[in-house]
C-alpha cells in the first residue's frame, strides 16, 4: 500500500492547547487508517534540535538578541528538515509538527520586532519554497493562555516569562500570516473548551484525511 505524505503544523501562543489538538489529530489519522504518522516538534525534533531547544527555553539566557534567537531556531529547523521531515515525507508518512516557521514569524518577527523580511531571508535559505500542506492556528487570548500555563504549575520558560505586549505582537503576526494564506491556514478558536478545540481540529483536516488514506 502507498500513501502520500502530508506535512501538518500546529501553531499558537503558550497555553493555546496544542497538546489537546495533537491528540485529536492522532485519533483522526488512526480512524482514517493513515499509517505511521510522525509527531514531532520545534524547536527540537532531533538530538541537536532538542539541545538547542533547551538552550532557547532556559531563563538564564534572558536578554538573548532577537537575531541570535532567530538564527538558532533556523539552525534547529535545518537539521529537523534534513534528518526527519524530508525523509519521512519521502517515505510517504504524514508529519505533524508542534510549531514550525510560522512560529518564527510570530515570536521573532512579531514578538521580538525583527519583522517579516529578515525571517523570510532565513526561510528561503533553509527551506526554499517548502511549506506545510495545512497549518492549524489555535488562536487564544494571551491572558487565557497564560493563565492555563500558570495553573499547570511547572515553572516558566524564557518565553513564558515575557509580558503581554510580546504575546499580543506574536498573536497579531500569526493572524497576519493566516489572513495572507487562507488556503493553508485553518483558524481555531482556542478560547473554547478542549472538546470544542478537538472538534475544530478534526474538521480542519477532514478534507486532507479523506484524500490521504492508503490507496491500493
Ligand atoms: N518558539 C518556537 C520561537 O520563539 N520560535 C520558533 O520558531 C519556534 C518553533 C516552545 C517555545 O519556543 C518558541 C515558542 C514557545 O515559547 P513550547 O513548549 O513548544 O515552547 O510551546 P508552548 O506554547 O510553551 O507549549 P505549551 O505546552 O505551553 O502550550 P500548549 O501545548 O498549547 O498547551 P497545552 O496543550 O499543554 O495546554 C496548557 C494547559 O492548558 C490546559 C491543558 O490541560 C494544560 O494544563 N488546556 C485547556 N484548559 C481549558 N480549555 C482548553 N481548551 C484547554 N486547552 C489546554
Image (tube, grey):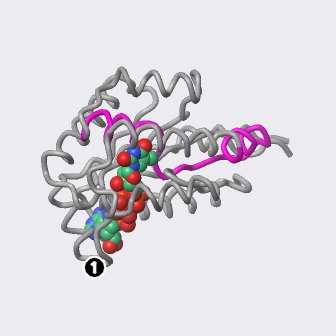
Q: Is residue 23 above or below residue 178?
A: below
Is residue 136 visible to us here? no
User: Which residue is depicted at the point 61% across and 42% down?
Assistant: 210
User: Which residue is depicted at the point 55% across and 59% down?
Assistant: 51
Provide residue 211's location: percent of width, then percent of height.
64, 37
Residue in front for this viewpoint, 197 or 50: 50
Q: Is residue 70 above or below residue 21?
A: above
Left/right of residue 171 with respect to residue 41 in the rendered view: left
User: Which residue is depicted at the point 63% across and 47% down?
Assistant: 95
Provide residue 103's location: percent of width, then percent of height.
39, 42
Q: Which residues are magenta?
A: 83-111
Q: Residue furthest bottom?
A: 153
Residue in front for this viewpoint, 66 or 5: 66
The residue carrying pointer 1 sits among few (fewer than 14), some (14 to 19) or many (20 or more) residues within 10 Å by Cα, namely: few
| Residue at numbered disc 1 | 153
Residue in front for this viewpoint, 70 or 183: 70
Q: Quadrant of ligand 1?
A: bottom left
Q: Quadrant of the C terminus?
A: top right
Q: Determine the image quadrant of residue 26.
A: bottom right
Disc 1 on helix, strand or loop?
Answer: loop
Is residue 65 visible to us here? yes
User: Which residue is depicted at the point 26% across and 35% down?
Assistant: 110
Left/right of residue 27 with respect to residue 2 in the rendered view: left
Amino acid at each position: 500500500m502507498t500513501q502520500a505524505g502530508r506535512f501538518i503544523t500546529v501553531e499558537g501562543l503558550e497555553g493555546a492547547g496544542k497538546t489537546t489538538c495533537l491528540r485529536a489529530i492522532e485519533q483522526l489519522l488512526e480512524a482514517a487508517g493513515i499509517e505511521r504518522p510522525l509527531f514531532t516538534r520545534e524547536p527540537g525534533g532531533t538530538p541537536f534540535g532538542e539541545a538547542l531547544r533547551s538552550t532557547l527555553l532556559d531563563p538564564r539566557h534572558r536578554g538573548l538578541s532577537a537575531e541570535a534567537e532567530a538564527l538558532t531556531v533556523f539552525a534547529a529547523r535545518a537539521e529537523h528538515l534534513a534528518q526527519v521531515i524530508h525523509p519521512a515525507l519521502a517515505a510517504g508518512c504524514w508529519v505533524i509538527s508542534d510549531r514550525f516557521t510560522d512560529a518564527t514569524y510570530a515570536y521573532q518577527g512579531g514578538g521580538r520586532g525583527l519583522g517579516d523580511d529578515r525571517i523570510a531571508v532565513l526561510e528561503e535559505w533553509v527551506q526554499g519554497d517548502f511549506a506545510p500542506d495545512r497549518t492549524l492556528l489555535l488562536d487564544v487570548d494571551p491572558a487565557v493562555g497564560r493563565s492555563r500555563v500558570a495553573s499547570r504549575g511547572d515553572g516558566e520558560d524564557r518565553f513564558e516569562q515575557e509580558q503581554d505586549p510580546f504575546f499580543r505582537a506574536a498573536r497579531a503576526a500569526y493572524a497576519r500570516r493566516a489572513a495572507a494564506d487562507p488556503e493553508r491556514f485553518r483558524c481555531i478558536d482556542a478560547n473554547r473548551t478542549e472538546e470544542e478545540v478537538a472538534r475544530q481540529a478534526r474538521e480542519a483536516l477532514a478534507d486532507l484525511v479523506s484524500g490521504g488514506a492508503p490507496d491500493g
